[in-house]
């Protein structure tokens, strides 16, 4: 190696070393900058995990309590089995709202309760209360409203009195949930056309089946339109529900035009004197743009079949998807005029508080809630009953 080559080699090596040093410095700087945020994130996650574990314990305790104070484990197990046994779709089962909301109540509501039942509510507890609300899937705006209530209580020196704070949280939740909407007048038109929208799997067909059963029971003549032509199984599923409810189903070919199925259904309802047409739709097409285009077309064709229709357009949202449900609603609202929301699967999630965010942010009334798979597990949404069931357990009762 010549002297010159040696000089080049040393030069190249020091360039590489300098470069590596620079990269490490930059990484360290980034780490320093993100450190705060990621540490906060980590702490938040740890807190959430801890709370979820507590929540599971609380849920178990609640189930045990429900099984009776002197019930042995066996009895509790039996009850567990019973709850897990899947009901036949359409099977009649008495479903209590309070049971349907057990998971949500055991989630953020129980966490709030535990914090509020602490002897002294200091800055740290206040921070934890805010954290619970912000991570409760109720949406940032509704969370801020509820936290504002707690802060207001603080300024009134009420924080020594958890019962008073609990009452105020109930009241504020009730205010958020009470979207003033006139009840549905099913006789406003004949046939009354209800169009049902929502992404795949949220519970559209199930909801339509349950609703058809309710309406036929109250003496209405209901016709169902199998507008989800995307999957063959969707039509079969609607037919099963239709048979149970005593409501005929108008169907098309798989892959056929949903608009024409719904058009035919409305024409048949006009000819045969049905009171209500409920139209199912697909929640998935090849792309989101396809889906939205198709729904627009469905809207236009319905209008052609009957002036003034659809009389109601309901969006079905799955509460287990939490905040995502609100995003879905915003997407559909851009395309269609949504006049009502059905929130399903409240029985299967601790994220039921999302209903607060929905009422607060969407300005569309929640009409029905789904609290199970059976035919009776569709409830007309009643804000007062909902709040009562949600805040059923007063934390001050456990505080002593
Ligand atoms: N636990 C529970 N399951 C539900 C509820 N509503 C619907 N489901 C279930 O959700 C799944 C999807 O429902 P489906 O009606 O087919 O959804 P679609 O694709 O929107 O028509 C089915 O297994 C239903 O039984 C509810 O309120 N609670
Ligand atoms: Mg369906």
Image (cartoon, rainbow, N blue to C red):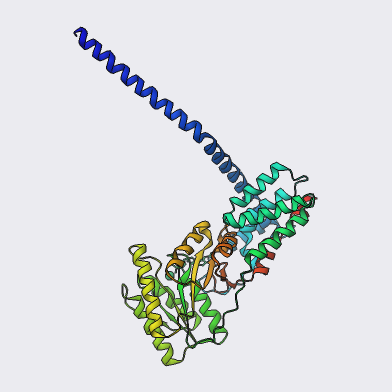
Residue that extends furthest to the top in the rendered view of this protein: 3
Which image quadrant: the N terminus? Answer: top left
Percent position of residue 29, x then y: 46, 29
Query: Would residue 177 appear left or right of 290 to someone viewing this image?
Result: right
Q: Which is more toward the observer, 112 or 349?
A: 112
The answer to whether residue 271 is left or right of residue 48 is: left
The x, y position of residue 263, in whole percent, is 37, 82
Q: Residue at x 60, y 71 (%)?
A: 381
**Residue 245 in view (yes/no):** yes
Q: Residue at x 71, y 51 (%)?
A: 151
Q: Is residue 138 above or below residue 226?
A: above
Of residues 327 and 101, the one drawn nearer to the viewer in this rendering: 327
In the rendered view, tell whether residue 39 sits above or below residue 382: above
Residue 213 lies, in percent from the top left, at: 53, 79
Across and down, in percent, residue 249 comes to 42, 81
* Left or right, residue 13 beside residue 360: left
């Amino acid at each position: 190696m010549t002297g010159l080559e040696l000089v080049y080699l040393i030069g190249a090596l020091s360039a590489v070393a300098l470069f590596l040093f620079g990269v490490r410095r930059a990484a360290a700087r980034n780490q320093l900058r993100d450190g705060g945020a990621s540490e906060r994130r980590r702490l938040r996650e740890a807190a959430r995990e801890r709370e979820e574990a507590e929540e599971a314990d609380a849920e178990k305790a609640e189930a045990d309590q429900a099984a009776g104070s002197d019930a042995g484990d066996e009895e509790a197990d039996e009850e567990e089995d019973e709850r897990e046994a899947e009901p036949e779709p359409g099977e009649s089962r008495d479903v209590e709202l309070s049971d349907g909301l057990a998971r949500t109540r055991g989630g953020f509501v129980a966490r709030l309760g535990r914090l509020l039942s602490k002897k002294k509510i200091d800055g740290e507890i206040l921070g934890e209360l805010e954290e619970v609300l912000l991570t409760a899937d109720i949406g940032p705006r509704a969370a801020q409203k509820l936290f504002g209530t707690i802060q207001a209580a603080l300024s009134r020196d009420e924080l020594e009195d958890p019962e008073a704070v609990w009452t105020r949280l109930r009241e504020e939740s009730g205010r958020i949930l009470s979207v003033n909407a006139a009840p549905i007048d099913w006789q406003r038109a004949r046939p009354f056309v209800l169009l049902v929208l929502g992404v795949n799997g949220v519970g559209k067909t199930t909801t339509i089946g349950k609703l058809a059963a309710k309406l036929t029971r109250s003496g209405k003549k209901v016709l169902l339109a199998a507008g989800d032509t995307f999957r063959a199984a969707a039509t079969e599923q609607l037919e099963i529900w239709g048979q149970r409810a005593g409501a005929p189903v108008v169907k098309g070919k798989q892959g056929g035009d949903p608009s024409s199925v719904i058009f035919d259904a409305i024409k048949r309802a006009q000819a045969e004197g049905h009171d209500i047409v409920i139209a199912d739709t697909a929640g998935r097409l090849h792309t989101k743009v396809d889906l939205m285009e198709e729904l627009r077309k469905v809207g236009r064709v319905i209008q052609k079949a009957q002036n003034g229709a659809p009389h109601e357009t309901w969006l079905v949202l799955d509460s287990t998807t939490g905040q995502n449900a609100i995003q879905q609603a915003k997407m559909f609202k851009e395309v269609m005029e949504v006049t009502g929301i059905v929130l399903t699967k409240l029985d299967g999630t601790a994220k039921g508080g999302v209903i607060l965010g929905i009422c607060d942010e969407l300005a569309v009334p929640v009409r029905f809630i789904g609290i199970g798979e059976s035919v009776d597990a569709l409830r007309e949404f009643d804000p007062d009953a909902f709040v009562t069931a949600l805040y059923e357990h007063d934390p001050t009762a456990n505080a002593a």
